[in-house]
Image (cartoon, helix red, strand yellow):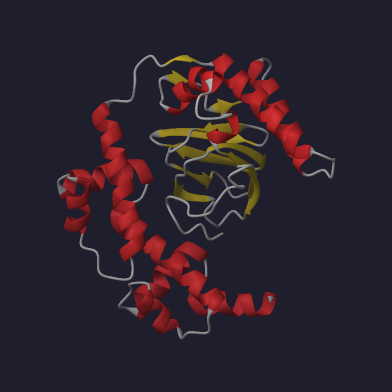
Amino acid sequence: MDKSTLKEARKHGTPIYPVSFYDIACPPDAPLLDLHWHDELELLLVTEGSAVFRVDLQDYELRAGEAIFVNAGELHSGYVTNDQACSFTAVVFHSSLFSSGTIDYLFDRYISPVLERRYEVPAHLRREPGAGLELLTMLDTLIEIYNSDKLANELMIKGLLYSMMSELIGLGGPAARTKPEQEGYRIDRLKTVIEYIEQNYAEPIPLHKLAELARMSESYFCRFFKRITTKSPIEYMNSYRVQQAAARLRQSDAKIMEVALDVGFNSLSYFNTVFRQRFGCTPREYRSRLQKSG
């Protein structure tokens, strides 16, 4: 899988129908879901295996049949928890789906408080008796309708998403406390740091530069970065660089050393080591497999 940006550049659906479905299958030795965020809401349903998904600072362990709800703007990532393959279906939809115009009483009353974190809804949906099970049943139906060829299935999908948001809101309540302002500020600074990495990965990026962007000391920045991403800044940069390298190996016939230099590695041996850690093979082997499968 090559999910190469933190704030996704892809458009989910269209402005007039902002809904998209994605099926992701991940072998046990590959990353499941790289850290990213987007302006849309998302429902992730694990369909095979098990995984841990991190949403901002909270970890959720999901088994097949369980799901998580990710609010707009929340950093999220995931990794496989055992030696088995894992698959999930993601339903990504923009909050504009629930708005009928510039002035919308229902949107302002129910959706805005969720988006603004003034109202909390459950994130982890378990397949247990109760409203959570009803929501998962609706999610199953939603995916089934999407995969069908029924006439006007978009209308059914939109209607179900309305019903699901209503159920989610019914399970929640006013936020007991808002996220500490300082903590939210730091997460926003972290987004700035990772966007900087995405834009400058081909050049040397000193740690002190990233700490300055985050307005933290280097030592605190490294601890905070790892707490959010589960990786050190160096590990994250190297991971991002080899993702870009994999894309270049797929899309061009450039020499391996040229690819390494293009994505910010000055040492071919170090590039090979980091690439193998991420993809389980060397860049040359990766390209060879692509050529055989193509």
Q: Quadrant of the N terminus?
A: bottom right
Residue 268 horizontal side relative to residue 15, left or right: left
Quarter of the image holding residue 190? top left
Residue 241 pos. (x, y %): 39, 66
* Residue situated furthest right in the rendering: 150
Residue 188 pos. (x, y %): 31, 41
Residue 222 pos. (x, y %): 24, 48
Query: Does any portion of residue 239 appear in the rendered image?
Result: yes
Query: Does any portion of residue 232 appear in the rendered image?
Result: no
> Residue at horizontal 46%, vertical 20%?
120
> Residue at horizontal 58%, vertical 21%?
168
Residue 42 pos. (x, y %): 56, 37
Q: Is residue 33 above or below residue 247?
A: above
Q: Quadrant of the C terminus?
A: bottom right
> Residue at horizontal 61%, vertical 33%?
67
> Residue at horizontal 48%, vertical 54%?
9
* Residue situated furthest front in the rendering: 102
Q: How many marks?
A: 0
Q: Is residue 231 above or below residue 143?
A: below
